[in-house]
Each structure stands twice: as structure tokens, then as C-alpha cells.
Amino acid sequence: MVPAEIIEFLSVLIYPGFIFIFTLAFFYEWVDRKFVARLQNRYGPLYAGPGGILQPFADFIKLLAKEDITPRAADKTTFRVTPILMLALALSTLFFIPTAYTTAVSWFEGDLIFVTFLVSILVLITLIAAWSSTSTFSTVGGIRVVLQMLGFEIPMTIVMVGPAIVSKTLSITNIALWQYTTGHYFAIYQPIGLIVLIICLLAEIKKAPFDIPEAESELAAGWITEFSGRKLALIRLTTDVELILAGALVTALFLGGPTGPFGIPSVIFFLIKTTGVILVISNLRALFARFRIDQMLGGFWKYLVPLALLQIILVTLGVG
Amino acid sequence: MDEERVIIPIGPQHPALKEPMNFMLKVEGEKVLEAIPNLGYNHRGIEKAATVRTYIQNLYLAERICGICSIAHVQCYAQGVEKLLEMEIPPRAQYVRLILSELNRLHSHLLWVGVAAHEIGFDTLFMYLWRDREIVMDTLELITGNRVSYGFTMLGGVRRDISPDMAARVKKEMKTVRDRTQYYKKMSSNERSILKRTQGVGILKPQDALALCACGPTLRASNIKWDVRREDPYLAYNEIPFNVVTSDGCDVLSRMIVHYDEVIEATNIIEYALDHMPSGSFREKVTRRIPAGEVVSRVEAPRGEDIHYIKSNGTDKPERFKVRAPTLGNIPAVCKMLSDSYIADVPIILAGIDPCFSCTDRVTFVKGEMGKGWIWTQEELRRYANRWYQQR
Amino acid sequence: MEHELLRNLRKKVATEKYPFIKKKPPEGLRGKLIIDMAKCIGCGLCVFDCPAGAIEMIGKGTAADLKVYLDRCHFCGQCAESCPSKCIVYSTEFELANFDKKNLTIEFKRKL
């Protein structure tokens, strides 16, 4: 008889914890890269493993082995700690969203608010990381990260409230379950909310057309410019985990989470639904040119905030 | 300089610049007030090297001034030498050279639009354009045998002929390129995110363009009809009907449109030239010694007007060789465009003139404020150098 | 634009798998040069015209051997043009990268 504590510990460590999430992170990076490449008439990753599926993992290992340079002017401690902190935060956010099972690893009434809080903290950590590396490119990139947050955070939070109002719970797990038990999927009943959330998440995970903080042709690598070696590996892993985060959040709030009929394991439904969301995100990434920061902010405040409010008004009027 | 203003250096190493060049930007917040260029990071001593090589060897040196407009530079040089010889190259050679020049323009323009798309973060368009540019590269490879340095133009003609087989294939490819370009033109002038980044960005008014001696597509995008192919026809350009494309937007978008239109125009020129190629020899023997004299020759390179000056003293080596690449003519214009723009727009504005700094860097003094250039004699330069080293 | 993206999804990929699948080089590609010493008359025009100084003559006249430094050669093809007896030919072999400069020096000797 294995004690319950050990099972819980293993679930955090292996499934659906770290190992599962990391594998998924590499897999989704591959899906994203491969899909964008095919849209652009390229192969994308090709030689590492079947169809290049191991390429993201190979990149990660390569970066781990690379020289790790800390700029002389950098704030050493902060510079060292921030990549770890970012990864930890992204992972702990994922623990509150149902992935492999219909319930999240950890959940409580009100974790929806906690998740939005963690997402904002993640952005602030990015700013601190950029600031501590003291290079011009990083600093400008960091400022742009925060400016971008001012744009996407309000509409994102507003539309996330939509499902909560209808299902009368503030827990992501319960929102997902509620959709399954009532058959009332929010993707159908709150389409505006879904669109706004996906656009905001694009900005959150800093993918084109909102890769303004990393704008290659303007700022080299933006806020990550000074990071190298292991730190860069962690940051890239964080980016991938954030990609799952985006997929899982949309899945849980609007597509009913990892639930489905026929007694098929819930993780299969989770994979299908998030892959769908990630393909949409990849497609949007290939479709647009990068916006300028002022255009992005203006667009978010002029169009997305009113749309998000409209969605909430519709919900409270009983349409959702 | 004003103490309160921040100066941001762009370059010599900067992701927006593919080659080293330095711009000092005086900024106030996000706005650029003034841009001061610093040239000379890429000086390779080509002009000096040319004076110790024979005219034949210089063909290959001229070709290597720039990798992209290699045909244009070598054409300009060969044309100059042929003028010194007072010879006319055979008509067929003229047509073959003309076709090559236009193919060169095609691949340079497609390359530029791709780079511009990359600067505004539109990588999909970049990938598509470079994929279709590959068709042009394959065509060049088919005709000349090589991809970048063609070694095709010789003094007195060209190295190889275009066979009917080649002509048929080139014509087929030109149709594909034209169709694709028409699609991209339509897409670029309708896609919202492209318009947002290019419309009204990097304005160069027609009178400024003239006053600052802009050239090539940059000038034509400011609605001034000027093209060396039309104003001072060389090769067989006076026998071929073509339009000088202009656009009146004066911004980066209209520069993009001008490039697209010139690609379409170039495919038409190539098709016409292939249909109307005269028969006959494609090369004439040329003496090794070139009669004394001096000559200025100019061609319309893909990036603008390219000027070569050659002075001969009757031996087999030139006494003086001077190159003015089109980018040099556009630098004052780009400084004008940069002033009163946003920092985020700097990459696309810089890319907007299709810069090629390794073409540009010759012995030119640009120091202090823009426009104050001067030329020194060798003696003055030597004295200056000695003084400078003593002071150190 | 979305239509174009989806169209490309179905299309054959444009990238070439170069080192694994090799395309036939075009005719007239100037690769590694080959000198037929039986035809060489030892005039030295190739040495004189080579812009890169990649050809060296050892000995004099019709008895001379030729040495080609491929690391200097930039494959312009002028030597083949200048040669009066047309003994210099460019092959289409272009994969010439090497770790050792010595391997890039080819000597063409007259067989006596």
C-alpha cells in the first residue's frame, strides 16, 4: 500500500506534473514550429527524431551545454534568479488548470483570480529580468513587455470573468466540469470572449504579431538579449510552458477542459483541444506583420476592451 | 550638441543593418529629431586595388563590389572601358546583357521586399518572396552557370549565348514570377498590418528627394520620373518599350509598390528582349591596352544610379577608378526621412532605401554635420595622418 | 492571405534537402578546374590574367608545370577564357571545402 502523500508527490513530479508538462512543452513547441513552417512552405524541424519532433528538446540540451555569460554591469543575483522564478511561476500557474485529469493538480474556489494574478506576476518578473541585465536592448524590451501588459491585461481579465458568471463558480476546474455536465460550452455561447481571450493570450506569450518586446529587427532579442546558456534554456522552456498555459486556459474556460464522452481518458481530450488552440495561435502568428507598440496599445483599448465589456453585458443580460 | 537630448547610436552593429554603418540619432522620447550618418566601416580599398590590376582582372573586381547588384557594377565598368575603346558591342551581346541586367533587378527587388517584410515582422511574406526569388536565381544559374558572381560580362560582349532552350525556360519562369508578384502587390496594398507599419512612414517629399539627390526606386517612389535607362539609354534600352514606374505616396509603402511594379516591368522587358533578340556574334575581341582618356559611365542598378569613373593612361591598367554606388546617393535622403520619425520605424526606414553599405564605402569624407564632405589631395591626407598620429 | 497560407499547407515544400539529396549542378557551373597538360603550350596567359593569383608556373615555356591554389581561386573562369589552346576546363565539382590548405593545392605535371 503506497501512502497517499507519495502518490501526490509523484503526481506533482511526473504525471501530470513536471515531466508531463515539460514533454508537452517540447511537443507543442514542435507543433508550433512545424505548423508555421508548413504554412510558410518550409519543412521546419526535420532531422532530430521522426519529423524533427525531438528538435526542441535537442535545442534545450544544446543551450544547457553552452557558455553562460553574465554581463559585468548586470545585477548578478536578480539576473541569476529570474529565469528560475519565471519557470516556477509558469509551472505553478499550470497546476491550477486541469490538464491530464478533469480536476487540476491543486484547486480551490477562487483560483481563477489567482491564475490571473500569477500571469501578471510573470510579466513583472520579465520586466525585472530585463532590467537586471542593464543592456539597452533589454531595458527597452522590458518596458515594452510592461506596456503590452497594460494593453492585454484588462480585456483578458474581463473575458475570463464571463464563464465564471454563468457557471457561478470562481474555480477553473469547476468551470470546465460545469460545461461538461450541462453541455453548455462557452465557445458557442460566448464567441466574442473566446476571440478576445486568444488575442490577449497571443500578446501574453509574446508571439507575432505581438512579439514587440522581442522585435528582432529593432531590438536584437529584446528583453532576452543578455541571457545565454542555461538561463536562456530556462527562459525558452518557460515560453513553451506559457504556450501550454495559453492552450490549457482557453480549453478549460471555453472548451470544457479535459472532458469528453465515451469514457476515453481525459488527457486525450485535453491534447486534442489544446492542439487545436495552438494551431489557431500558430496560424495567427503567420498571418500578420508585427504591430508597433502604440498601435498595439491603441488597438487593445479601442477595440478589445469594449468588446470584452460587451461580452460581459451580454452575459449579465442572460444571453451567454 | 544639445545636452538635454539623448543620442541613440544605431550601428555599426545592429540587427536592422545587414552591413556596418552608423547613425547617431538625436531623440526626444520616442521621436527622432535628427540623424547623423557615419560611413566608412566597410572600406575595402577596391579603388586602389583596381589601379594595380589589368582591365581584364578588374572585371571580376568590379563584380565583387556588391554581391547583389554584381551585374550592374560589372556592366557599368565594362561599358566605361568599351567607351574608352570607342567600340560598340555586337547587338546580340547588348540584348543578352540587358536580359541579365533585368534578371539582376528582379532578384534584387524581390530580395529587398522580403527584407522589408522581415523588418516589419512579417516573416511569412519574407519566406514567400525569397522562395519565389529562388526561381530568378535558378534562371540566372541556368544562363550564367553560377548563382552570385556570374563572371558573365566580358569586355566586348558576354561569355555565353542564350540558347533557344534557355529562352523558352526563362520565359516560362518569368510568367510565374509576374503572377506571384501581382498577387503580392495586391496583398501588400490590402493587408491591414502591413499598411499600418508602412503607410505615412519615412516620408520623402518630391522637392526634398531632388534636393538631396536621391536615386533609383527611392526617387521614383517620391513621384519623380527619373531612370537612367530612359534618360541616358545604354545597351538596347532605347529599342525596348517599358514604363518608368512611379508612385506618389512618398512613403515606405509606395517604395514597396514601386519595387513590385518594377519587378513586373522587368519581366515584361525580359520577355520582349527574348522575343526580339537579333542574331549574330555575342562577343568581340578586345585589345589589352586601353587608349588614354577618361570616362564616366552610368547605369541604372537595381538600387539606383550607379556611376563609375575610369581614367586610362594608355597602359593595360587604369590610372584611377572611382565608384559611386547608389546607396551613397540615398544616404542624405534617408537622414531626412529619419528626422521626425519614431524609433520603432527606424529599421524599416533604413531598409527602405535598400541600403548596401559595402557598395558604398569609398574614400569619402563625411564628418561632423551632414553634407559637409570634402576631398583631399594625397599630400593633404598624408599631412593630416601624420598630424593625427603625433597628437595621439 | 489566410487562403494563401492554407494553399501553401497543401503544396510541396520548397526547401531543398541539400546535403542529403543533391540536385544536379547546372551546366556551365564553374567548379574545380582541370588542366589538360598535354595541350598546354606554356604561354603563361592564365597566370597573367588570373585576378586572384591562383595559378603558378613552375619552370618555363613548354616544359613548365602548373600549380593551382584552389583556396585562392574565386572561380571567375578568366583562365579558361584566356587560354589560347583551350586546355583549362571547369568541372562542375563544387563541394571543395576542406580543413587543410594543402589539399586545395593541385599540381598539374607534364607526363614525359
Image (cartoon, rainbow, N blue to C red):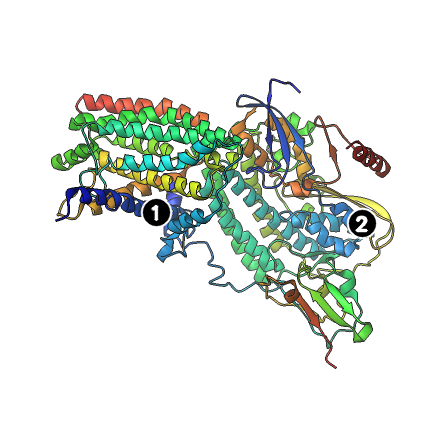
Quadrant containing the C terminus of chain B is top right
Amino acid on which disc 1 is placed:
Phe
Q: Residue furthest bottom?
A: C112
At x 64%, y 47%, the residue is: B69
How many circles with numbers are drawn on the protein? 2
Q: Is residue B239 visible?
A: no
Disc 2: which chain?
B
Q: Decide if residue B146 is on the left or right side of residue B285.
A: left
1 and 2 marks in contact (CB < 8 Å): no
Amino acid on which disc 2 is placed:
Thr
At which x and y percent is residue B388?
A: 79, 33
> Which structural element holds mark 2?
helix
Q: Decide if residue C20 is on the left or right side of residue C49.
A: left
At which x and y percent is residue C19?
A: 49, 61
> Which structural element holds mark 1?
helix
Quarter-of-image position of residue A143 = top left
Q: Which residue is mark 1?
A: A26
Identify the mark at residue A50; answer none if there is no mark: none
Q: Which residue is mark 2?
A: B51
Categorize mark 2 by other alpha carbons within 10 Å: few (<14), some (14-19), many (20+): some
Categorize mark 1 by other alpha carbons within 10 Å: few (<14), some (14-19), many (20+): many
Q: Nearer the viewer, residue B124 or A252?
A: A252
Q: Decide if residue A278 is on the left or right side of residue B268.
A: left
Quadrant containing the N terminus of chain B is top right
